[in-house]
Amino acid sequence: MRNLFLILFISLSFFVRGQLTNVLIDTTSSASCKKELSGEYTRKFQDVNKNITASNSDEKNILKELSAETQKDFLEAIDNNSFSCDSNLNTYLQKLLNEILTRNNINPTDYKILLSKDSTVNARNWGYGIIVLNFGTFLYVENEDELMFILSHEIGHQCLNHVKLGMERYAKLYTSKDIAQKTKEIQKEKFGKATKANDLLKKLMYQSYSQHRKKEIAADSLGLSLYKKTLRNPKAVITVLQKLDASDDEKDSLTIADYKSIFEQNEFKIKEKYFEQEESLFSKYDGEKRINVDSLKTHPDCSTRIILAKKYFNNTLKENITKSEEFDLIKKKSINQNLYNLFSEKSFGISLYEALKLYKNDKDNAFYKNIILMNLIEIQKSRNSYTINKYVPSYDKKYNSSSLNRFVSFLNNIKVTDFDTIITNFKQ
C-alpha cells in the first residue's frame, strides 16, 4: 500500500510539474551550459589573480583573500544553477546591455549579463564585468526603458570600478596602523573589552555604509549619463524609481476570510486557533526599521534619486516608451515564473504565500492551483520531518507583514491530518 502511494505521489509530481513547465520560460540550467560558464570564469579569474597588486605584502594578501572569496561565491552560484541558461532570454538581455555600452563607446566584450533566478527585486555589479539581474525585477518594471535604466546604473558601478576599489579600501583599512593600534589598546583593557571592540566595529560599519552611499550616488550620476545616450524615454527613470520606492510595500494580503474561501471544502473548516500568534521575546525592538543596503531601493534612497534625475533631465520628461515584444513576453510570464523559481529554490513557504494571494482572485487558474499543491506537498513533508523552518519563514513581528505572520502561524498550527485533507481537496 505504501509503495502504491509513493508511485501515485511521484506520478502526481511529474504530472503537475509537466503542466507548469509548459507555460514557463525555460530557466533550467543544463549541464553543458553550467560547465561552459564555470570554465569561462575560472579561466578569467585565474588571469585576474595574476595581476593583483598592492602597496605592501599584507594588503596584497588581504586582496587575494577577498578576491578568492568573491570568486568562490560566484562559481558556487553557477554550480547551484542560480543563473538561467535560456539562450533566447540571455541573448535578449545581452542585446540590451550592449546597446548601452555601444552608445557610450564602451567595449561590449568586457561585459556579460546573467539572469539570476532570485525572485527578489534587485540587480548587482559583481565586478569583473559581470552584471547580474534578478528575475524578480520583472515583477516591477513595466517596460524595456525602465529595465535599461537599472542596467545603466549597474554598468556605472563597473565603469567606476567600485567592487575592485572597495576591496582595496578594505585591505588598506584592515592593515592600517591606526586599526592595529586601537586593537592593541582594547586588548590591554582590563574591563569593557567587548563594548570597546563593538564600538570600533560599529564605527567601521558606519564608515563603510557612508562609502557605500557615495558609490551609489556616483553610479546613479554616471548611470543617468549612460542612459541618456541610449535616447530612450527619460520619464522611465522616474517611474521605475517610484516603483522601487514602493517595492517594500506588500501589494496584497491574506485575511482569515481568504483562508476560508480558499480551503473550506468537503466539510473542512478553518478555525480561529490556526492563526494564534506567539508574542516575540524581543517585542520592544519590533518597531525598529531595518536597513537593507543591498537592494535597488537603496541606490541611494529613491526620493533623492528622483530629485537628481529630474534635475539632470531639466524636468523635460517626455512620454516616449519603447515597445518591445520580447520584453512584453517576459513580463507576461514573470508572475508564474517567479512562483516557480521560488519553488525551485525550495522557498516553499513564500512560493505558497504569493500563489495564494493570486489564487484567491482567480480560482480557475490551473497554474496557481498546481503550484499551491506542489508547495503544500513539500511543506507537509517538512512538517513530518520537523524541518519546516528550512522552507517557511519564521514568525517575525519586526520584519514580516501581519499577513505573512498570519500565514506562518497557519502553517505551524494546523494539524498534519489537516494537511492531508487540504491536499486531497486541491487534488480534486
Image (cartoon, rainbow, N blue to C red):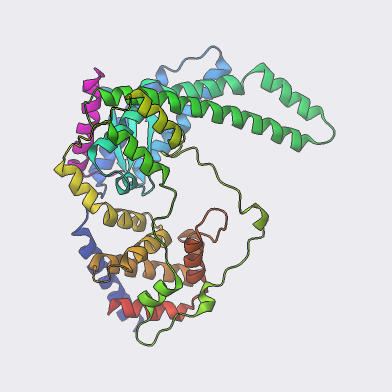
Magenta extent: 83-109
4 or 300: nearer the eye? 300
Residue drawn at x 65%, y 33% is: 202
240 or 80: nearer the eye? 240
Is residue 68 inside the magenta stretch? no
Q: Quadrant of residue 266?
A: bottom left
Q: Position of residue 26 (x, y in %)?
A: 22, 50
Left/right of residue 397 with respect to residue 418 in the rendered view:
right
Note whether 354 is above or below 34 in the view shown: below
Is residue 108 inside the magenta stretch? yes
Q: Position of residue 399 (x, y in %)?
A: 53, 53
For the stretch drawn in magenta, the main secondary structure is helix
**The N terminus: image quadrant:** bottom left
Q: Quadrant of residue 116?
A: top left
Left/right of residue 185 with respect to residue 116 in the rendered view:
right
Residue reaching furthest to the top: 55
Q: Position of residue 289 (x, y in %)?
A: 57, 47
